[in-house]
Amino acid sequence: MTAHRTGRHRSPARAARVVRTALWPVGVASAATLAAAPLAAAAPAADAPPCDSTADVCVDLSEQQAWLTDDGRATSAPMDIHSGSREDPTPTGTFTVQRKERHHVSKESGNAPMPYSVFFDDEGRAFHSGDTTRASHGCVRLERDDARDVFAALEPGDEVQIVR
């Protein structure tokens, strides 16, 4: 397991995801090339996620996108999301992952399946797989593969940041 910036340990799945996606923005390179490359102290890229460096997942409601992040850097490609409606908006702010349920069913929404649920607030809002063509009741809906990746990467106590 890799150490997390707060002293906690990341899950093996999160560590593997970080390693697997670390080269996503630059493509595949040899270890020798990477070892020889100087460390850049450049400003963040223009397409960097718009959240604080402490966030483990960043959601941009204006762009309807989310990223898994580490120290302010995206560790995943942008994921398309669908957020809440005007009547049931997805809240903005900083939250903490509370719990995960692989096969959650929402009693509040007529027993709607919510696969790969990662709950982040006291109102039952979560990241989960679902229909990304219509508004949610405040949740962050993701395509199935993205929901599976978020579910594998996040653990209770991880930071969720949602911005507009």
Image: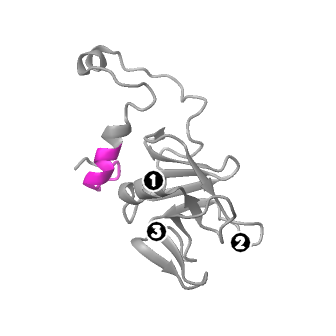
Q: Is residue 45 above or below residue 147?
A: above
User: Which mark is first along the chain, 1 or 3?
Assistant: 3
Specify start and end residues of the magenta stretch as a single range. 4-17
The amino acid type of the residue labelled 1 equals: Asp
Nearer-N-terminus badge (3/2): 2
**Residue drawn at x 49%, y 22% as measured from the top left:** 42
Residue carrying label 2 = 88
In the picture shown, does residue 47 fall above or below 6? above
Q: Are marks 3 and 2 in contact (CB under 8 Å)?
A: no
Residue with the mark numbered 1: 145
Mark 3 or 2: the one toward you: 3
Question: Which residue bears the numbered disc 3?
Answer: 115
What element does badge 2 sit on? loop
- Mark 1 or 2: the one toward you: 1
SS state under label 1 = helix
Crowding at mark 2 (Cα within 10 Å: few <14, some 14-19, many 20+): few
**Residue 96: image x %, image y %?**
47, 64
Label 1 and label 2: CA atoms lie apart by: 25 Å
Q: Amino acid at mark 2?
A: Asp
- Does the image show residue 9? no
Q: CA distance from mark 3 to mark 1?
A: 11 Å
